[in-house]
Amino acid sequence: MFNHSSKTALVTGASRGIGKTISMMLAANGIKVIGVATSEESLKSIQNIDNIIPFCCDISNEKSVEQLYNFSKEHFDSIDILVNNAGIHMDNILLRMKTDEWQKVLDVNLNGPFYLTRILLKDMIKSKSGRIINISSISGTDGNKGQSNYSASKGGLLAFTKSLAKEVGRRNITVNCIAPGVIETDMIAHLTDTVKKNYLDRIPLKKFGKPEDIGKMILFLSSDEASYITGQTFYIDGGISLN
């Protein structure tokens, strides 16, 4: 569909949900993918997929990210496409939120992309080419009750995307963001039928999104055809952000 010209990619949160689908779709289009997750056990879900190389890394730990970078250099000269997808949520109203609930969410959702982008950016700058795609959320712009930590981290990614796009554009590196709405993954499996209905009532398309909807946008933004798009946030949410 799109021209990726034998590119390499690194996807975080690659063992399940949106990240797994992204990794599989990139791999199916001939892209060599390093799929990153936090445990060896979870990586079993992608270890036998062609064009995907699994690696265990805690992206919230700077030393662990350095090990990931060294691993990537053993396989590829550089990473062409970085998808900062990994994210966690530890929901609580602010008055009851513990400091570690705040800190852990920001460490993974915001510090992780910072560590990883910074270390991979050196090679992108040298090669004067690269695609960086950050996965945010509609919570990053709209907020959500009980998710002040999650919303803050995802809102931070939006600003991070715009700032970095201005810094590296002259090096032919694009930086874009995707803000998914309610996507059918295990992250919404715990929702009650009532909560799901309330969401559906607010979604103009009257259905939840699928991980493939995000993957298709990743394929486009990482392709040569998207070379003049940078600093943008794309809402894949069935229109819920229009409310």
Image (cartoon, rainbow, N blue to C red):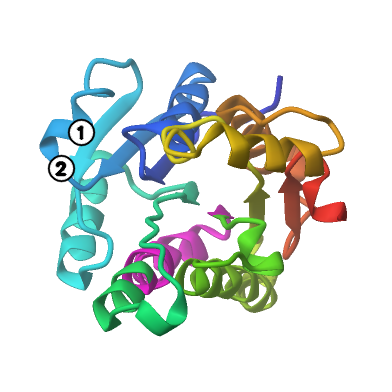
Which of the two residues, 154 or 146, is positioned nearer the viewer here? 146
> In the image, is 216 to the left or to the right of 240?
left
Q: Amino acid at mark 2?
A: Ser
Q: In the rendered view, does 97 fall on the left or right side of 63?
A: right
Label 1, secondary structure: give it: helix
Q: Does 153 sit above or below residue 176?
A: below
Magenta stretch encompasses residue 12: no
- Residue contact at pointers 1 and 2, CB within 8 angstroms: yes
Estimate how packed mark 2 is, as few (under 14), some (14 to 19) or many (20 or more) residues with alpha carbons within 10 Å.
few
Q: Which residue occupies 79% across, 47% down?
A: 240
Q: What SS does tag 2 mark?
A: loop
Relative image position of residue 108 (x, y in whole percent): 34, 64
Q: Position of residue 192 (x, y in %)?
A: 51, 37
**Residue of label 2:** 39
The segment highlighted magenta reads 106-134
The stretch drawn in magenta includes residue 109: yes
- Residue lying at the far left in this picture: please name it: 40
Q: What secondary structure is the stretch in magenta mostly built from?
A: helix
Identify residue type, mark 1.
Ser
Which residue is at 41% across, 63% downward?
A: 91
Locate residue 153, reporting x and y percent: 49, 71
Q: How many marks?
A: 2
The image position of residue 4, as x and y in percent, is 60, 31
Residue picked out by circle 1: 42
Quadrant containing the C terminus is bottom right
Of all residues, the one furthest to the front in this rendering is 194
Residue in the picture at 20% in, 68% down: 61
